[in-house]
């Protein structure tokens, strides 16, 4: 009996296949894709400049060392990290024809891309939390949402996706890849990778669904619930001007939520409805929804937030005075 069990285990080990790496297929039929990735490289440079600008303004302006701007600073760090995890490797793969990715490198990219993608979702929910406290509890906001408490909230918001994505990516190691090692995506995407396995990947399917619900839909639900509470709080303000001023502080955040979640929801709803979309369309949708929000976030916050615009005007005013003197 022991000999039979040992033989069975040996056969299972012999059939377990871990590939040296994966080949990133990318676009299949789309023409002139080089221009698209050149566009993404321009987006990446602009993303770095815009986010480092807003981080510098917050870092050096003491008046912006408040819970709200701690949350915005965290979002800017996530934007830079998300773009860096995704775009440079894609440019290397498709502009310089380095589409083969070693196994460990592939899993590393998978972790960081999905981790920072979920962090975008959590960072937006942290900003919703800040608006909720500021508008619904204006007299107690300094107590309920101090700088220390906001830092703790941000740390927790970084830790939860980290743990979930560590488990999700680690489960890839239990899969055997005895079939194709070609990934129908533009990076080491979780779904296209585990679907290539020839062993049971039901646990990976479960974690994929779990990630979507916990890391994206729950934060969105919290954001929506926050704004329901905010609307009720605004209705209690007597003057129309008071309501307008209070709601104006939310417009930047609402714009970011719409920019980030709209394409994401469309992608997931199509996937859940089992509607077949061609690979090129899916790659275009997912790549743009992953790269455009990190560029727009700092631009929207810079243009629509008076405190940041005041700091920029102050900087140029001081420079002009120094130049004259």
Image (cartoon, rainbow, N blue to C red):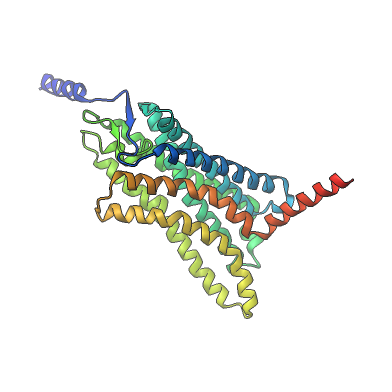
Q: Residue furthest right?
A: 325
In the displayed structure, would residue 69 be above or below residue 202?
below
- Across and down, in percent, residue 43 comes to 52, 43
- Across and down, in percent, residue 125 comes to 50, 56
Residue drawn at x 55%, y 77% is 235
Q: Quadrant of residue 127?
A: bottom right
- Can the viewer see residue 68 in this picture? no
Is residue 193 shown left or right of residue 91? left
- Can the viewer see residue 220 in this picture? yes
Foreground residue, 22 or 133? 22
Foreground residue, 228 or 91? 91
Foreground residue, 175 or 84? 84
- Across and down, in percent, residue 132 comes to 55, 64
Q: In which quarter of the image is residue 28?
A: top left
Foreground residue, 270 or 157? 270
Q: Quadrant of residue 109?
A: top left
Is residue 21 shown left or right of residue 325? left
Q: Which residue lies furthest to the front in this view?
A: 32
Residue drawn at x 69%, y 57% is 307
In the displayed structure, would residue 20 be above or below residue 171?
above
Is residue 109 shown left or right of residue 310? left
């Amino acid at each position: 009996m022991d000999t039979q069990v040992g033989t069975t285990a040996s056969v299972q080990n012999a059939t377990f296949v871990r590939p040296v790496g994966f080949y990133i297929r990318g676009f299949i039929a789309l023409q002139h894709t080089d221009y698209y990735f050149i566009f993404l490289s321009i987006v990446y440079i602009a993303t770095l400049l815009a986010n480092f600008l807003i981080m510098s303004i917050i870092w050096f302006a003491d008046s912006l060392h408040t819970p709200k701007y701690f949350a915005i600073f965290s979002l800017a760090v996530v934007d830079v990290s998300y773009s860096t995890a995704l775009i440079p490797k894609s440019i290397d793969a498709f502009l310089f024809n380095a589409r083969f990715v070693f196994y460990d490198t592939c899993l590393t990219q998978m972790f960081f891309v999905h981790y920072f993608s979920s962090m975008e979702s959590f960072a937006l929910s942290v900003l919703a939390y800040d608006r909720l406290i500021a508008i619904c509890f204006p007299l107690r906001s300094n107590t309920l949402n101090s700088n220390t408490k906001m830092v703790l909230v941000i740390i927790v918001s970084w830790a939860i996706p980290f743990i979930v994505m560590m488990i999700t990516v680690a489960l890839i190691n239990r899969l055997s890849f005895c079939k194709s090692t070609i990934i129908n995506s533009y990076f080491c995407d979780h779904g296209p990778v585990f679907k290539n396995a020839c062993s049971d990947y039901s646990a990976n399917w479960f974690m994929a669904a779990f990630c979507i619900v916990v890391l994206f839909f729950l934060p969105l639900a919290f954001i929506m619930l926050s704004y329901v509470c905010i609307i009720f709080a605004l209705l209690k303000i007597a003057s129309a001007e008071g309501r307008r001023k209070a709601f104006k502080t939310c417009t930047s955040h609402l714009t970011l939520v719409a920019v980030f979640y709209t394409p994401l929801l469309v992608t997931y709803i199509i996937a859940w409805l089992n509607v077949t979309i061609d690979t090129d369309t899916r790659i275009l949708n997912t790549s743009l929804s992953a790269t455009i929000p990190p560029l727009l976030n700092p631009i929207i916050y810079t243009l629509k937030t008076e405190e940041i615009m005041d700091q920029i005007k102050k900087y140029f005013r001081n420079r002009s005075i120094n130049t004259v003197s």
